[in-house]
Amino acid sequence: MWPIHGQDHLLRQLEPALTQGRLAHAYLLAGPPHVGKMALALALAQAVNCLAGLGAPCGSCTQCRRIALGQHADVRVVGVGQGQDGGPTRTVIGIGDVREALRQASLKPYEGKCTVIIFDGAEAMSAEAANALLKTLEEPPPQVLLLLLTTDADSLLPTIRSRCRSLDLRPLAKHQVAAALAARPQTSPEQAERLARLSRGCLGWAFNALTDPDYLEQREAELEQVRQICQAGLEGRFSYAADLAARFSRDREPARATLYLWLRWWRDLLLVKEGVEAYVQDQERLSELRLQAAQLTTPQVVEFIKALYQSLDALERNASPRLAMEVLMLKVPAGG
Ligand SMILES: [Zn+2]
């Protein structure tokens, strides 16, 4: 039984490959943040090591359980984020981490049947690290499964992409998220419905919001800041730009998430302008959205949404975060 919600289109392709021993050596799991890439990667790691036979993982044998607990010696996650021993946060997957993981891949598995290396945030790999990985992708050792997770497959080297089988994860339908949330104990139907609406089909986000009250509170605070910055003068906007750029240099993902929050707010504004309020995500903020929408024209909203996409794109292309954010802040329409 796959511990995966949605993504049936991928499971239909993976399950026969597993039972017939036709699994590729490397897969590229692509999809928006929190859509379930790591959950699928870990389920695959279980499937190739499961003691209950070929196909979907059983979830209850010692191999499956050790992988779920993060205790399996042959399953390794290489990613950005907190450095080892609580060291500083890293924004790049460096050559050292990749070499060390590939060295492990060249050895026989220690306790299971297959070594699984998961590169979380593969788009953050340094050029040197990507080239080292490329060599292994060209001549993969036996009994190794390499899983690259990314929110942005286009930013990977084409030579890396072409050597991996693609698995594109899709956001879930709102009712699927609501059903998965409702299955959790002590979740009210209203809570499940609200989080499902805010999650945009990313179940991991909804689970985080369900278990960590700070998660939603922080989102609310950031949204409030977005609303205020829209009305602030240049000085306020520039200081916000500097702050966001500094955050981006420390850790890309949360800063990107803030920009996506901006995008949501402005999409909601557009929906209000177009008179389709039923589709607005932040139903709780409808009155504020109406107020702001009344001061803007539809072309202004559309133009600013375009500018947001351009900023996200510029950041992906390693533009200066400070410059990208300042340019964006200059484009906030007057009256916004
Ligand atoms: Zn198992």
Image (cartoon, rainbow, N blue to C red):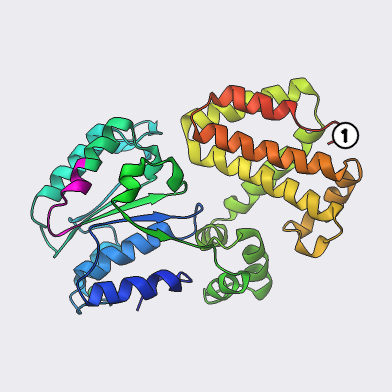
Front residue of this view, candidates 259 and 14: 14
Which quadrant of the figure has residue 160? Answer: top left
Q: Which residues are magenta?
A: 135-144
**In which quadrant is the C terminus drawn?**
top right
- Note whether residue 56 is visible: no
**In which quadrant is the N terminus drawn?**
bottom left
Residue at the (41%, 34%) spot, across then down: 91
Residue count near mark 1 (Cα–Cα under 10 Å), binned few <14, some 14–19, many ≥20? some
Where residue 238 sits: x, y (%)?
A: 70, 22
Residue at the (53%, 60%) spot, across then down: 211
**Vertical side of 294 occupied by 335: above or below:** above
Where residue 327 sits: x, y (%)?
A: 67, 25
Relative to 146, is 277 on the left or the right?
right
For ligand 1, the image quadrant comes to bottom left
Relative to 89, is 267 on the left or the right?
right
Residue at the (74%, 24%) spot, across then down: 236
Where residue 222 sits: x, y (%)?
A: 67, 42
Where residue 64 sits: x, y (%)?
A: 25, 69
Residue at the (76%, 62%) spot, across then down: 279
Residue ID for mark 1: 335
Residue type for callout 1: Gly
Q: Residue furthest left?
A: 108
Q: How many marks?
A: 1
Tell me, yes or no, whether the highlighted magenta stretch contains residue 221. Answer: no
Which quadrant of the figure has residue 96? Answer: top left
Which quadrant of the figure has residue 314? Answer: top right
Secondary structure at badge 1 equals loop
Front residue of this view, candidates 212 and 3: 3
**Vertical side of 5 occupied by 256: above or below:** above
